[in-house]
Image (cartoon, rainbow, N blue to C red):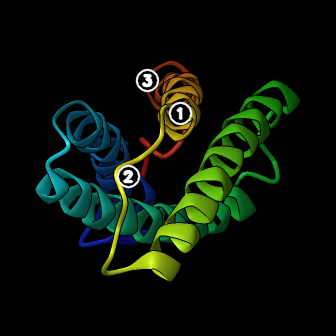
Amino acid sequence: MKIFGHPLHVMLIHFPSALLPMDFACSLIGYLTGNHSFTDAAFYALAGGVLMGWLAIIAGALDLAKLVQAESGVIKKVLIHAGVNIAVLIGFSLLAYKAWQLYPALPVDSIAKLVVKGFLIALMIVGNFIGGSLVLKDRVGASN
């Protein structure tokens, strides 16, 4: 799926790739300082990252429908990329839902929640690496 000749999925993925680590960074600073301004900023980054992540997944699913005739190795890599990033987004969506229930009285994240967020970020890096390989090595989404 393209807008003005540019692949929509590739444009959208940058938002969750930036906002979800920003949520983690702000949550960590909020934990270390006790400053609730960082907790609020983390919530907005989390909400934006989750929303844009689901939009990126929808765009990616539409692109996947066009790859039906691609070689099986590429399809396998696409499905691994999608599975990893969907799992990450489900995890962050659950965290966002729990935070939304507490909004506007957001507590500072616990160390356990920070560990979960850190794990999800690490998993997202793996999924994004696979996605980058699909674009740069396998040329998925790079051709007209």
Which one is in front, 126 or 143?
126
* Residue carrying label 3: 136
Q: Is residue 85 above or below residue 116?
A: below
Q: Decide which of 143, 122 is in the foreground and name it.
A: 122
Q: Earlier in the sequence, mark 2 or mark 3?
A: 2
Disc number at residue 16? 2
Vertically, is 101 above or below 137?
below
Label 1, label 2: how far apart the Cα atoms are: 10 Å
SS assignment at label 1: helix
Q: Foreground mark, 2 or 3?
A: 2
Mark 1 or 2 closer to N-term? 2
Image quarter of residue 112: top right
Residue 43 spot, x, y in % from top left:
32, 63
Give the image quarter of residue 127: top right
Residue 76 location, x and y as percent?
A: 83, 32
Q: Secondary structure at mark 2?
A: helix
Mark 3 nearby-residue class (10 Å; few <14, some 14–19, many ≥20):
few
**Which disc number belongs to residue 124?**
1
